[in-house]
Image: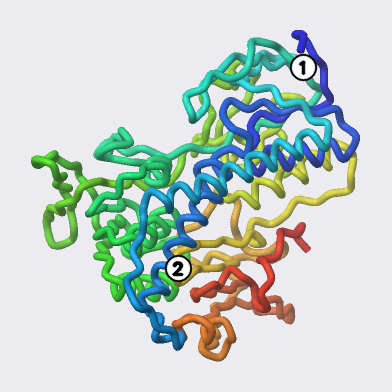
Amino acid sequence: MANGESYDCIVIGTGPGGYETAIRAAQLGMDTAVVEKDKLGGVCLNVGCIPTKALLRSAEVMADAQHLDDFGLELNGEVTPNFEKVVERSRGASNQMNQGVQYLMNKNDIDVLYGHGTLLGDGEVQVEPSTNMDGEEIGEEQTAEAEHIIIATGARPNEIPPLPIDEENVVSYRGAMLQTDQPDRLAVVGAGAIGVEFAYFYQNMGTDVTLVEVMDRIVPAEDPDVSAQLRESFEEAGIDVMTGAEVQGFEEDGEALSVEIETGDGTEHVETDQILSAVGVAPNVEDLGLDAVGVELDDTGHIATDEFYRTGADGLYAIGDVSGAPWLAHKASHEGILCVEKIAGEDVRPFSMTDVPACTYCQPQIASVQIPVPGQRQGRRRGPPRGLRQDDLRREVRRAPRCAHHRPQRHRDDRGGRQRAHPRDDRSRDDGVDAPAPDALGGGHGGEPRGLRPAD
């Protein structure tokens, strides 16, 4: 392709937010290109959501195999995990999805410009060769221009000083997902969605897991009751859970690692073979040329945008993880679709962050849609529905035993509940739902979780 190719829209990054944004732009008649420095599908499809769920499915099967009597089944022999094959299966799922995105690019006549994209100003993007996750050099040096450029570069694992990530002693989710040598002992630092999912996976593969969380409970973004139920399940499974615990550092002790942890009762040392640092994510804003084109960051380091994802620079937009929490693939996709529909002159409205469902895929799974209550950890731009203030809400909790639902009966768990908060006025909308339960994310009648909708 010759330098200076011109498009209506260029999307930088091809995670779920990026590639769905590009598809929608093409559907709306825009001549569209994407810029990708690694593999199509971004973190989610290659080293995130998709391969993680494949790993977790293997863990679920392994867990059920230990309780065949509960299902009226008998096994003459022993079920043991082949860790290398489990990882290989997850890579197969990822590769298949990657090929699917390539098919969608071809089907919608979207040009794929491989390489690292940098903003030059005046609608120009410079693309330079890059190295993908397989160590292959991809792309060629070229420039392209567009009237509208959408930044969808996502996020990467956050790193804290006590735990420098080297993907050997201290691994990120990427290392924990790709390694084929299973550690005998694993310390997971951070008990958000990523941390608890990997803790569940490794424990069911036979690794001794210690889960460390600096807050006073695990999955601190969820309702306290949900946190308590998940902790109970984890401890029953043999996971050692430490909350209100802050890692100070670690030392190599022969072939093992000694992790220094400060707790309310003093300093403890946990012996382990490997540490998984799962302390959140950081936006990919470096080396994009943002300063040169006048794109500003907010006080959290994310790209600042308005309600339709416009930055402070003409013709530049940002969607998904790079523009702030919650860092969820389905939220990124919805933002991108609204962004290009607004560009195309469609009649669209901003959506409320209170309508964004959250999901955690350990067992029991956690599905939630809720308004944060005072004292609860919150993501960016979340709050009460439009027209209501936080003070207008009263906290009314209703619990329904999960044993009354068909899904727990099909599994091995009758715990769980549902919580809601209602406005004080006559509007009876359910403004919060939590469902910690086996297969909670499969929907009430076997369907998939419903997608996002614009705010009412």
Q: Examine the image and state in which quarter residue 4 appears.
A: top right
Q: Examine the image and state in which quarter residue 142 appears.
A: top right
Residue 84 on image: x %, y %: 38, 48
- Quarter holding the N terminus is top right
Rendered view: 6 above or below 42: above
Residue 6 on image: x %, y %: 82, 17
Disc 1 target residue? 145
- State whether residue 372 appears in this view: yes
Q: Earlier in the sequence, mark 2 or mark 1?
A: 2
Say if mark 2 contacts mark 1, CB within 8 Å.
no
**Which is closer to the viewer, label 2 or label 1?**
2
Rendered view: 339 above or below 443: above
Q: How is the image coloured?
A: rainbow
Give the CA distance from mark 2 to mark 1.
49 Å
Three-letter amino acid code at the position of disc 1? Glu
Rendered view: 345 above or below 400: above
Residue 245 on image: x %, y %: 24, 56
Mark 2 nearby-residue class (10 Å; few <14, some 14–19, many ≥20): few
Identify the mark at residue 401; answer none if there is no mark: none
> Dot 2 lies on which element?
helix
Three-letter amino acid code at the position of disc 2? Val
Q: Left or right: 303 with respect to 427?
A: left
Disc 2 target residue? 61
